[in-house]
Image: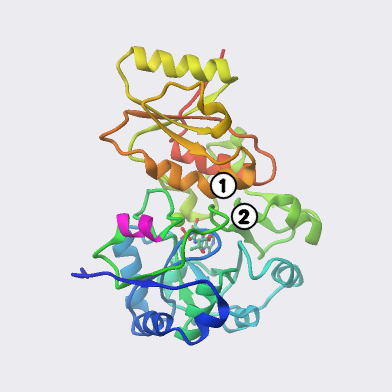
Amino acid sequence: MTYQHTIHWSVDNDVNNLKGSVEIKEAAQKLAAGELVAFPTETVYGLGASARSHAAVQSIFKAKGRPSDNPLIVHIARAEDVNNYVEEVPETAWKLMNSFWPGPLTIILRHNGVLSTGVTAGLSTVALRMPDHPVALALIEASGEPVAAPSANRSGRPSPTTAGHVREDLDGRIAGIVDGGATGVGLESTVVDCTQEPVMILRPGGVTKSQLEAVVGQVDVDPSLQETAAEEAPRSPGMKYKHYAPEAPLTLIDGDEAFFHMCITEAKDKGSRIGVIVDKKEAADVEADKTYLLENSDGETVARELYAALRYFKKEDVDHIFMRVQPEDDIGFAIMNRLIKAAGGRILSRN
Ligand code: TXA
Ligand code: MG
């Protein structure tokens, strides 16, 4: 379906104002009627559709250009609603939900068959999440539906962290966008398979491994996420596709500042226009053609700004984007997971 006009609903994030909000009511009606509505969560913007409507779910795949074997996350407004969609909730899953919901954690459980098979891509399991964003929660609640929502980008592009990013990718392809400003975490939720003990991280994200371990003890990591096992097939179907790709190719630079500068100089000498993503403090010394300045170099800031930074560079302006490899501790594990995919594995190392 194409739309002459994708509706833009501006809302403020104050829970009290959201309750009687005409905008939320209108957007919720569209969702309940089987149309596609993008909305903010604490991680990235999601592209929502009723998870009970097969037709609505199919239109998500169409609007995004997403392969249909890649299942969607179902968003709910109350933790106890998981009982409506799954066979049973193991003890560890309850512990995780109690500790991290609402929040950037998606749990995988065996489903009971009531949701559209399009949502689960025919698997026996379903991904569930209660987002920590007043707009998302108000919208889901008002729609009365479980809301299937992948990130609201065209498949293969960096996820959207503002309503403007959603518009770049999906204007005219969806019914509307609820604009609640920029998202907070900036990277998607952590996906954890709770059908096995110990539970296993399938996608690193907003909740870190050590945070999970503090609640349930040992946590495994899908072997395909370890660099040393790059050829392992990922267990989360979505992880195998091209992802987060900026318009100009990204190359990660693994080395000190001097090496980073050398890479830029060499590429410029060859006639390439270079874009760089650097921390504000580094900027003064970098002579790139275009620069995205990160507010700070800590993991939380890099995570929050990463997708906006990748979207900042247009192919008319630069031929290559360079960014230094980031530390892999805590949220850094998720940052490097996204960066390596965004770079299609291109890393320049000194040696
Ligand atoms: O933060 C987020 O999780 C955002 C916001 C909008 O909530 N959503 C998001 O959805 O990132 P999406 O569709 O872009 O990513 C969902 C990931 C994919 O890697 C998918 O393969 C995986 O979750 N997934 C979904 N259902 C699964 C299942 N039953 N088993 C294994 N992995 C699953
Ligand atoms: Mg996505």
Type of amino acid under label 2 = Gly
Which range of residues does the magenta coloring cover? 163-168
The x, y position of residue 209, in whole percent, is 71, 51
The x, y position of residue 188, in whole percent, is 54, 56
Quarter the N terminus occupies: bottom left
Indicate which disc residue 303 carries. Answer: 1
Q: Is residue 257 visible?
A: yes
The x, y position of residue 27, in whole percent, is 38, 79
Residue at left 41%, top 82%? 28
Quick check: marks 1 and 2 in contact, CB under 8 Å?
Answer: yes
Q: Quadrant of the rendered structure where residue 255 is?
A: top right
Residue 190 is left or right of residue 310, and the answer is: right
Residue at left 36%, top 28%? 320
Q: Disc 1 or disc 2, which is closer to the eye? A: 1
Above or below: residue 253 compared with residue 96: above
Residue 215 is left or right of residue 142, and the answer is: right
Question: Is the CB–ligand 1 distance for label 2 below 8 Å?
Answer: yes
The residue that mark 2 highlights is 206
Main SS of the magenta part reads helix
